[in-house]
Image (spheres, coloured by chain):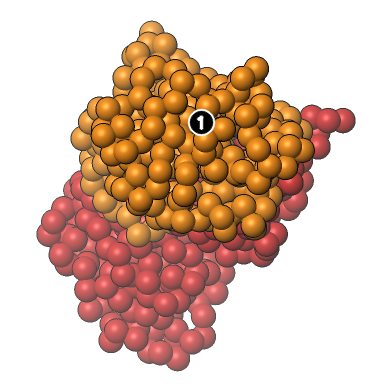
Chain colours: A red, B orange
Amino acid sequence: MKVGFIGLGLMGAPMAANLARGGHQLFLFDVVRIPADLIAAGGVACASSGEVAGRADVVITMVPKTADVEQILFSPGGVAENLSPGKLVIDMSSSAPFETRKFAERIGKIGCEYLDAPVSGGDIGAREGSLTIMVGGTDRAFERARPLFALMGRNITHVGASGDGHATKLANAIIVGGTMTAVAEALHVVKLSGASPAAVRAALKGGFADSRVLDLHGKRMAERDFVPGGPARFQLKDMRTAEDFAEKAGAHLTILPKLIEMYTELIERQGDALDVSAILLEVERRTRESTK
Amino acid sequence: MKVGFIGLGLMGAPMAANLARGGHQLFLFDVVRIPADLIAAGGVACASSGEVAGRADVVITMVPKTADVEQILFSPGGVAENLSPGKLVIDMSSSAPFETRKFAERIGKIGCEYLDAPVSGGDIGAREGSLTIMVGGTDRAFERARPLFALMGRNITHVGASGDGHATKLANAIIVGGTMTAVAEALHVVKLSGASPAAVRAALKGGFADSRVLDLHGKRMAERDFVPGGPARFQLKDMRTAEDFAEKAGAHLTILPKLIEMYTELIERQGDALDVSAILLEVERRTRESTK
């Protein structure tokens, strides 16, 4: 297949490499640089998003923000202006669901299909081709994209209609943030009481409190290993998108705003180079602050 | 072994029945009633906690609150007055860790051993003998009690010193409450946005957001099945004990007080007969309230 890939950063570059290894002809664009190994693997460097859209049949975007997606798609000389009917656009970024539905509608009007297909699993999952991919859009578009998803990910779910893939990614962010912070508060208290966080974590495994977060990040907290992994700043970015999504959906949440407040303060004080599990440091700081 | 069992309610009765099936001679007391099937199985009905302590070598308590444990142990005519040196007391209730350490010290002074060994797994786990048991106390006391624990539970961990078993149970309550409420907020938003909570839950399985709570209680939320299961009032009780524990440990928590506030309002409005996953109803109420 002729596949365009726009956004070749930490996630996009290894995802594109897996498509190239699967035998697909790549058309590549990034505002910073196009990795040499993708060119060496037969990829074609393009001068703009518009050129990618003109030459490829399927166009994938993997960029930081919803506003970046909008610009790539709809700015003058961008993707939309250069698509011809029958092509497929797949946004694999973590974008906002309601905006995504509007993008899909505009792309639909020019006779093309649109999928939202955000991922989780981090740069390790991107390199290993083991990402979780959550897809929103029509059955037809999903079936068309499936062979590409299979090269990039392992746990691939067609969740529902347009926007539902991005909604799932934001649900993921809320749940991971809430679980992470509860684990941090629990291990903080047991440590202050004189118990061993590592022993408590081990005792909870297999019970109702068990989770991937307790397993992977509880271990990091017990060992105080906060080198990412999945950076706290990505967690915060996704939770902020989730908060905006919740507001537009008409929901009034209690826990999510507290999580955003805590992660914001963590990054303000500790910088943005720490793992998502470093929320333990903010939990500890709040205790110190309260006893001043 | 001659085993005393004080507190024969929803949890204690089936736990004692498993000890009887294991061939142990039971001495039984409860302030309400002693179940007939335990007497039929050879158990001896005692007239007081003190009588249990005088006749059994190991005395187990399984009662609602820390204050109940204190009363059973130390009131006039209670357990402590009737113990002779060398006996073992095991508190399997969900009690407060710091108070437990004091109880253990007082029991130690009369030449007896003390373990805290709270459980999770609910009345189903109690009946099936599949409870998770989290134990605090000395190695020697743990080894002595292990054959009894093996009849009542499956996942049995010696976490650490006296009080650490109860600390683990409270960590469990914080993590379960936080994960539950985050799952409820996430599924609430996706539903309002038009996506399917059941499909989103299914898509998140296997990823970083996966947990026992998402699996069991996320399914209940998607199906709106709030018949317990594990009642919300037990979750609230344990979280309140955890809050008191956190305060005594010197921790200043952010998320736990919000969880307690939400569960308190849930039970005030919906009664105390719902499952712990019914926190979704309180999440939904807060949205309705905000748009009035």
How many discs appear? Answer: 1
Q: Is residue B209 above or below residue A289?
A: below
Give B48 or A28, whichever is nearer the viewer.
B48
Quadrant (top left, top right, bottom left, bottom right) of the C terminus of chain A: top right
Residue A193: x and y in percent read 72, 41
Give A70 or A238, whichever is nearer the viewer.
A238
Give A256 or A146, whichever is nearer the viewer.
A256
Residue in the image at 28% along x and 39% along y: B41
Mark 1 lies on a secondary structure that is helix
Residue in the image at 48% along x and 87% along y: A37
Q: Is residue B288 above or below residue B180?
A: above
Residue in the image at 49% along x and 25% along y: B64
Residue in the image at 74% along x and 46% along y: A194
Neighbours of disc 1 within 10 Å: few (<14), some (14-19), many (20+):
many
Residue B129: x and y in percent read 34, 48
Read off the residue under disc 1.
Answer: B52
